[in-house]
Image: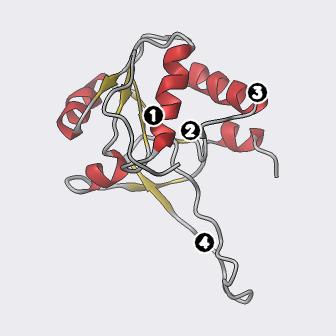
């Protein structure tokens, strides 16, 4: 999901750090679709694997939620959970992000726009740009999203 991304997203507002900072007062739904760290194959078996995902404070983490192709069940789970979090208000500001040059946040934003969400903002600078000027926090995968994923 990494590579040069477009500069626009039809139906969404592309924002930079200043745009996100201005939007924070409106309490947008912050949708982090960054991938979860995978345990390296050569990781010592006698060591505990404790990856930590850091994100923008208040973000809801949907690991892999921005995959280009989500199967119908995963896409439905993503959309259902976003709808729950915005309490059915499809005009509420929503910000999708992950890392720079990550197609996941663009894909998630496009998916939301295509389903009729009108307050979608895409923050292509993602967590990296945020943490240049602000603290990040450790987050866990959204429980409802995580429960919908096959184990």
Q: Is label 4 or label 3 in front?
A: 3
Element class at badge 3: helix
Q: Residue 52's x, y, as percent? A: 52, 64
Category of crowding for the residue at label 2, using alpha-carbon neighbours closer than 10 angstroms: few (below 14), some (14–19), many (at least 20): many
Element class at badge 4: loop
The reply to whether dot 2 and dot 1 touch (C-beta < 8 Å) is yes
Category of crowding for the residue at label 4, using alpha-carbon neighbours closer than 10 angstroms: few (below 14), some (14–19), many (at least 20): few
**Residue underneath mark 2:** 66
N-terminal of the pair, mark 4 or mark 1, is 4
Give the spatial CA distance, label 4 vs label 1. 28 Å
N-terminal of the pair, mark 4 or mark 2, is 4
Q: Quadrant of residue 37?
A: bottom right
Category of crowding for the residue at label 1, using alpha-carbon neighbours closer than 10 angstroms: few (below 14), some (14–19), many (at least 20): many
Give the spatial CA distance, label 2 vs label 1. 7 Å
Give the spatial CA distance, label 4 vs label 3. 31 Å
N-terminal of the pair, mark 4 or mark 3, is 4
**Residue underneath mark 3:** 72
Q: Residue 73's x, y, as percent? A: 78, 29
Question: On screen, 129 above or below 47?
Answer: above
């Amino acid at each position: 999901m990494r590579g040069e991304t477009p500069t626009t997203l039809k139906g969404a507002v592309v924002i930079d750090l200043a745009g996100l900072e201005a939007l924070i007062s409106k309490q947008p739904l912050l949708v982090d679709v960054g991938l979860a760290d995978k345990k390296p194959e050569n990781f010592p078996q006698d060591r505990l694997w404790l990856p930590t995902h850091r994100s923008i404070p208040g973000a809801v983490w949907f690991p892999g939620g921005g995959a280009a192709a989500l199967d119908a069940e995963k896409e439905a789970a993503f959309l259902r959970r976003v709808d729950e979090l915005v309490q059915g208000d499809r005009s509420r500001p929503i910000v999708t992000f992950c890392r720079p040059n990550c197609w996941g946040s663009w894909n998630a934003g496009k998916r939301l726009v295509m389903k009729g969400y009108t307050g979608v903002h895409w923050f292509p600078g993602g967590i990296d740009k945020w943490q240049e000027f602000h603290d990040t926090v450790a987050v866990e995968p959204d429980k409802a999203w995580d429960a919908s994923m096959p184990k």
